[in-house]
Amino acid sequence: MLSLDARAGLEDLYADYAARLDDGPLETWPELFTEECEYLVVPRDNYERNLPIAVMRCESIAMLRDRVRAVLETVMYEPRYLRHHVTNVRGRVREDGAIDARANFSVIEVLPDELPRVLITGKYVDRVVRVNGELRFAQKHCVFDSVLVPNTIVLPV
Amino acid sequence: MTLAIDWPQGEITRIPYALYTDPGVFDREMTRIFAGPGWAYVGLEAEIPSPGDFKTTFVGNRPVVVTRDESGDVCVFPNRCAHRGVKFCRQEYGHTRHFVCPYHQWSYDLQGRLRGVPFIRGVKQQGGMPADFERADHGLPPLVVTTRHGVVFASFDARVPALEQYLGESNLAYFDRVFDGRALTVLGYSRQLIPGNWKLMFENIKDPYHASLLHVFLVSFGLFRADQPSAVKMDDTGAHSLLISRRGEQKRSDATSDIANLREDLVLEDARLLDPVKEFAGDATVVMQTIWPNLIVQQQSNTLALRQLRPRSPLEFELHWTFFGYADDDAAMTKRRLRQANLMSAAGLVSADDSEIIKLAQDGVSRFRDDAAVLLMGGRDVQDTDHMITEGAIRAFYRHYRKVMEV
């Protein structure tokens, strides 16, 4: 069990994370990770079968920034709004002081001329550490439940 | 049934938009193209290595089961019970000795032969199947199956020619370039439901013209550029095609002056994302192959993937990605493949352009059914070329399409 303070800290981290993705600026999203972080967006079937392919794979904060830049400056996509809903946040303190954190997520996507729809749902399998007093993701595995996604996951999850 | 498509005889430089929306066209495609004499990709042998292993997939929009039987042969049969049509196998993959339909528990062996029918002789002399009921008459009709270097194809139509003949010389040679007989390792899957007609996906991969303009990421990093030595090759029918090119530099040239958003200044902070090494003989660093009716073989630098098309309706299709490597890859090569996969599939920095474009194309053609697409780049013919400023492979596709569809 986490202390109430630790739980509140974790909840705040997820809220901040979602806000940076949904409301931007997207360039600030990598700031919530450690230098040597691992960020994966991976279908649950791959994850549970130990198949290593992820649809997004970043192995450092620099690679996260590269993805943001590539998305913003090179990818052609319809404009869209995303809304992350992060629930069931829970955590366990490891012996090394890091927190193994879990949460559910669903992402609602709004495209031009279309009603909101569920883009993906899944769970975060994360490891959170404190860097200079601030909570940061050392690992974030976004494991989504359907292999099939509606068209394209353009923006980070 | 005749199709209500206004399309002058022999025309392949204009493609009626109705082909992307018409339910009658779609139904005929499912019959003539996907259930006709073509080799449809259904999987890799590495997915079903041992007797009793199976996977489920689709040929066109028809569900099928792919198994390895006791003798080690690969079998493919419809995933629908011979009794009342239930799609009996609900798992994507697994291991079994037999399949049992959950409705009335008819059971089938690994070759799809009917083995058990509960109450076949009735209960207490009541009911039961007629005396002339033969289980052998009620099996699951097998598809014809062929494998080449670990890749499994199936066809509903036994008239399909041998795969080697079907692909033709150049397409076979490039197929063998990636599938050279080495054991394959599946790295994982990704699937997209793309709101567009399935043919738009084939057109996209047969169109090198767009790749050097739309894909700013590819072009900016020199992975695919109009000024690089390139080739477009087809088989004699035009059904299959190859786009072949090689990596260039990240700088402007005469050839890139038409590319509005080339980003010469784009530099990766973590260069590991794109750290290609040469692994195939020859100069080509990218080969995109389309194999009629449902497969794209992708070799872009060190990402190897099969993209299988599953049409769902005239208006949408699924794209099933299977990423793979070789069993003898070292850890560094596997890592490289996994990192480069960032460019591809459901969140691909390059392929996202294509799935987004296909959606926008469908949004347009769906509402202007009486109009037609223009395919004049590179001329009006269907010849192989040694450049990529052409739509010849798309014209060749439609020439073959018209013959098969009788439209």
Image (tube, rainbow, N blue to C red):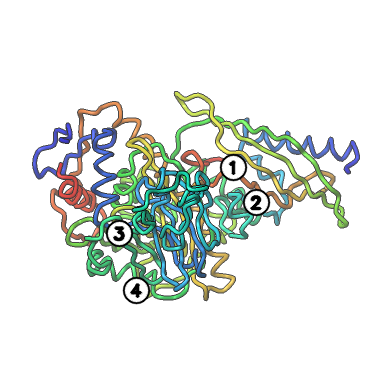
Secondary structure beneath label 3: loop
User: Is residue B84 visible in the rendered structure shown here?
Assistant: yes
**Looking at the image, which residue sits at the far left?**
B9
Nearest to the eye among marks 4 and 2: give it: 2
Q: Which quadrant of the rendered structure holds the N terminus of chain B?
A: top left
Q: Quadrant of residue B313?
A: top left
**Residue topped by disc 2:** A39
As measured in the structure, the alpha-carbon distance from the residue carrying label 2 to the one carrying label 3 is 39 Å
The answer to whether tags 2 and 3 share a subunit is no
What x and y, as percent, mark residue B182?
44, 75
Amino acid, disc 4: Gly
The image shows residue B332, relative to residue A85, as above or below, that is below
**Residue topped by disc 4:** B282
Amino acid, disc 1: Pro
Secondary structure beneath label 2: strand
Amino acid, disc 3: Trp
As measured in the structure, the alpha-carbon distance from the residue carrying label 4 to the one carrying label 3 is 28 Å
The answer to whether the residue labelled 1 contacts the one labelled 2, judged by CB atoms less than 8 Å apart, is yes
Disc 3: which chain?
Answer: B
